[in-house]
Amino acid sequence: MKKSSIIRTIAIIAGIYIIGQGICREFFSQRIKNLDDLQRILKEEAMNIGRIKESKDIYCFFGKSPWGTAASGKIRKGQYLLILDKDRSRTAVRHELYHIFRGHCDKAYEVGEWTTFDKIKNEITARLYADYGLRL
């Protein structure tokens, strides 16, 4: 077997493992049942990720979003919106909070839209934080 084939096989297996772990974490993570539940989990998770010095007001909406089942965005300076539907979990809150606290929402607000590269990079890093707590 060639060295490149071995490396490719290992990369595929690692990718499947990482994605599988993420799916399992999402599936077995604490479910959000109502807005009070969302606000409580948001407060807990914001304290975990909140190494950021500036204060951020995060408004919660529990329902469908035009952008999918979970979304976050900047409203104005220091104010953010987090939207989750009833089918999501604590892992989704962690993912969206990562976007807010790492400045992804700020950049999208200022520029108007992420580039394709930024979308891919930001989604991967937010997913890694939500699943494994990695702050990249």
Image (spheres, rainbow, N blue to C red):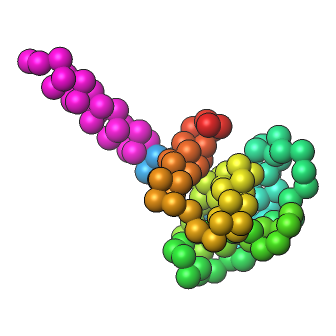
Query: Is residue 11 in the magenta section?
Result: yes
Rendered image quadrant of residue 85: bottom right
In the image, residue 92 sits, relative to residue 51, either above or below, namely below
In this rendered view, identify the residue nearer to me: 96 or 41: 96
The total number of labels drawn is: 0
In this rendered view, identify the residue nearer to me: 120 or 116: 116
Q: Please identify the dominant SS of the magenta region.
A: helix
In the image, residue 109 sits, relative to residue 100, either above or below, namely below
Q: Does residue 12 appear left or right of residue 124 in this picture? A: left
Question: Where residue 55 sits: x, y (%)?
Answer: 91, 55
Q: Which residues are magenta?
A: 1-21
Q: Does residue 50 appear left or right of residue 2 in this picture? A: right
Rendered image quadrant of residue 67: bottom right
The residue depicted at 30 percent of the width and 31 percent of the height is 11
- The answer to whether residue 4 is seen in the rendering is yes
Question: Where residue 106 sits: x, y (%)?
Answer: 73, 61
Task: Indicate the quadrant containing the C terminus: top left, top right, bottom left or bottom right.
Answer: top right
The residue depicted at 78 percent of the width and 43 percent of the height is 48
Give the farthest residue toward the left: 1
Give the farthest residue toward the front: 111
Question: Where residue 70 sits: x, y (%)?
Answer: 58, 68
Q: Does residue 134 appear left or right of residue 10 in this picture? A: right
The residue depicted at 80 percent of the width and 61 percent of the height is 40
The residue depicted at 86 percent of the width and 59 percent of the height is 56
